[in-house]
Amino acid sequence: MLTWHILTGIHLKKCTGSYNPVIFSANSNGNGKANLAPQEKEKGKGKLNSITKHKHSVRASPQNGSIAVTGGFTVKMSIAKPLKKLASCVILDLDGTLINTEALLSDVLGGFLSKYGKQWDGREVHKTLGKTPLEAAAAIVEAYDLPCTSNEFISAINPLYSEKWCNIKAQPGANRLIKHFGGHGVPMALASNSPRENVEGKISFHQGWKESFSVIIGGDEVASGKPSPDIYLEAAKKLNVEPSSCLVIEDSIPGVTAGKAAGMEVVAVPSIPKQSHLYTSADEVINSLLDLKPEKWGLPPFQDWVEGTLPIESWYIGGPVIKGLGRGSKVLGIPTANLSTEGYSTVLSEHPSGVYFGWAGLSTRGVFKMVMSIGWNPYFNNPEKTIEPWLLHDFAEDFYGEDLRLVIVGYIRSEANFPSIESLIAKIHEDGRIAEKALDLPIYSTYRDDPYLKSCVKDSSHL
Ligand code: RBF
Ligand code: MG
């Protein structure tokens, strides 16, 4: 019998609502192995230089705290803690960080601009990120040459916008983060450029959020919005803490600038893909809230990782298996097939890139364990976001045209770049072993019987 591992690839257009897969935090896979992005290493250097105030060349390993300093002499030392300041409270941005406002913006603007005979193409979205409402409005009025003032634009858009607040989804990991810090008594503030009233309106649709924040500051409550530090300084003041003991979590560049100007530690979670390299002033850039490691900042660690995996709210995707380009089989030695993603671009844009796992149902064949990557494959730097599930089973033949259904139940790590194809392959096999083992745990194994998978399996009696 031939040994076939099926690696399917689902390709879809780059979606603005997704995350950048390029930057990865140390220790982001939750199983003790660190993937360190070049930017992170640079960050370590910068920190050390600023701490030592010497013109020595510095090598830092932020993941284990060992440092080597050279410059006429060599010093080697070990430190117990990572090179980060310790935080006692967390200040969160709202739009793009805790909630996926971007999809809503495209929806509302698309409809509004069509009345003026214009088409929203999403290209200006970066001009609105982290901006005050007036700045964002001015950017759009100018870009689309609209026959109205920024204020008129805001008045026209606001009602359209607020009636859709109830549909804004929480970013993956947002509820988990709020529950975690709330449960551990870590004070949290919400600091947004949006007017206070809008902030309250938006969070009212998310159960338990309002009560979790000791402080909420809107852009209308300070002299200047982000990138000015005002909002963050006011939040610290109301929390009754020093700015230096605050950890800021932000998706936009103006927001990161504001947090740094306030003297705070800032973790960036960019909400536009492939932009991570622009977040140079952030203390760390992570791919999604799922990758946050609070212990790096002296805050209580998440305790929900199980055997190197993070249980997530299950989600579903499926389609017929179609012939792919064959790059996977050529380069990795694994036969590939593509899965048609027609109608799934929204679902995929809502999920951060990374390595996930779950169960795969194939009509006529049964249900199999599955591990997959979503994203731009940093090693290959794909122009499109792809989803590539690998069915952990030896198949005797191809099954193009068959209906493949996936239920995704857990997360393993963010996508990474690798120095060689061998190390990429080794990592993918490690992912496979992690998924294979984890899927036997009761929290994941129950999904094997999910009706979504069964409905397409015509004969599962032999399983
Ligand atoms: N590609 C990357 O560039 N970086 C990764 O971290 C990565 N992880 C993967 C994990 C799994 C479980 C799978 C199935 C694929 C992964 N890939 C990754 C994608 C791989 O490069 C891709 O399948 C090949 O391009 C073949 O199409
Ligand atoms: Mg934001």
Image: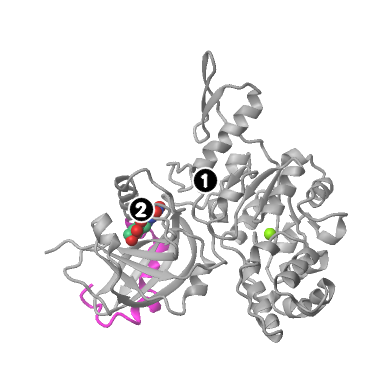
Identify residue type, mark 1: Ser
Give SS at disc 2.
helix
Q: According to the image, what is the colour scheme of the structure?
A: one colour
Give SS at disc 1.
loop
Q: Quadrant of residue 177?
A: bottom right
Q: Tell me if mark 1 has few (under 14), some (14-19) or many (20+) residues whose alpha carbon lies within 10 angstroms of its own.
A: many
Residue sticking out furthest to the front: 145
Identify residue type, mark 2: Asp
Residue at 87% across / 58% down in the picture?
221
Q: Quadrant of residue 240?
A: top right
Magenta residues, as a range? Answer: 436-463
Is the CB–ligand 1 distance for label 2 below 8 Å? Answer: yes
339 and 199: which one is in front?
339
Q: Quadrant of ligand 1?
A: bottom left
Residue 317 in percent (x, y) is at: 42, 74
462 and 57: which one is in front?
57
Residue at 71% across / 53% down in the picture?
255
Residue matched to label 2? 431
Describe residue 211's horizontal placement relative to residue 331 as left or right.
right
Q: Is residue 328 visible?
A: yes
For discs 2 and 1, the disc positioned in front in the rendered view: 1
Establish if 432 lies above or below 41.
Answer: below
Residue sticking out furthest to the top: 73
Q: Is residue 440 visible?
A: no
